[in-house]
C-alpha cells in the first residue's frame, strides 16, 4: 500500500472511530464486544483499501461489522447451545442440601 493510501486510511479511522464504536455497541450490546468488532472490521477493510470495491468506506466498515456480529451470534447459538448441560443434582443451587432433603413438617425452616 502506498504512503498516500495508508495516510488516507489512517485519517478515515481517526475520523470514524467514535461513530464505529457506537454502531458496534448497538450491534453487540456490550462494551468489550463493541471495542473488538470495529477493530476486526477495520482490519478486513484495510486489506481492500484502495480497491474500486469500496465506494463509501464508512458504509463498508459498518456492513463488515454487521456481518461479523451475525457470524459471532450464529457461532454462539450453534456451539454454545448444543453442548450438554452440566449434571444436575435435582435441586436448585440456591437451595441448601439440608433443606432439600428434609420434609416440611420435620424442618422448622419451612413455613407451615
Image (spheres, rainbow, N blue to C red):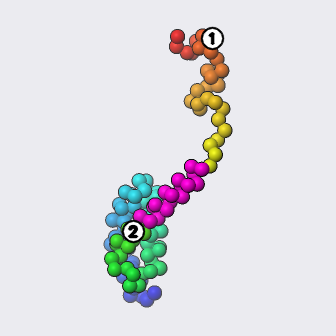
Q: Which mark is residue 28?
A: none
Secondary structure, mark 2, is helix
Q: Is residue 97 left or right of residue 36?
A: right
Q: Quadrant of residue 38?
A: bottom left
- Where residue 28 sits in the image (x, y, percent)? 43, 56
Looking at the rendered image, the disc whose residue lies closer to the viewer, 1 or 2, is 2
Q: Quadrant of residue 58?
A: bottom left
Ranked by sequence position, the earlier of labels 1 and 2 is 2
Secondary structure, mark 1, is loop
Q: Quadrant of residue 87?
A: top right
Q: Is residue 83 left or right of residue 58?
A: right
Residue 71 is a magenta residue: yes
**Closer to the camera, 11 or 86?**
86
Q: Look at the picture and state if 11 lies above or below 70.
A: below
Res 7 visible: no
Helix, strand or loop: magenta stretch? helix
Q: Which residues are magenta?
A: 66-82
Within 10 Å of disc 1 (Cα), the crowding (few <14, some 14-19, many 20+) is few
Q: Residue at x 38, y 73 (%)?
A: 60
- Where residue 4 sits in the image (x, y, percent)? 38, 87
The residue under label 1 is 106
Q: Residue at x 41, y 53 (%)?
A: 29
Q: Which mark is residue 63?
A: 2
Q: Residue at x 35, y 60 (%)?
A: 22
Q: Look at the picture and state if 95 lies above or below 9.
A: above
Q: Look at the picture and state if 13 lies above or below 18.
A: below
Rounded to the nearest angstrom, the CA distance separating label 1 from label 2 is: 63 Å
Q: Residue at x 39, y 81 (%)?
A: 53
Res 22 visible: yes
Amino acid at each position: 500500500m502506498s504512503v498516500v493510501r495508508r495516510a488516507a486510511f489512517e485519517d478515515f479511522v481517526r475520523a470514524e472511530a467514535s461513530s464505529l464504536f457506537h454502531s458496534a455497541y448497538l450491534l453487540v450490546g456490550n462494551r468489550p464486544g463493541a471495542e473488538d468488532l470495529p477493530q476486526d472490521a477495520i482490519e478486513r477493510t484495510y486489506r481492500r483499501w484502495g480497491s474500486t470495491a469500496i465506494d463509501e468506506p464508512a458504509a463498508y466498515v459498518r456492513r463488515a461489522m454487521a456481518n461479523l456480529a451475525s457470524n459471532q451470534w450464529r457461532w454462539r447459538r450453534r456451539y454454545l447451545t448444543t453442548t450438554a448441560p452440566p449434571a444436575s443434582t435435582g435441586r436448585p443451587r440456591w437451595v441448601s442440601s439440608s433443606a432439600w432433603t428434609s420434609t416440611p413438617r420435620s424442618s422448622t425452616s419451612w413455613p407451615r
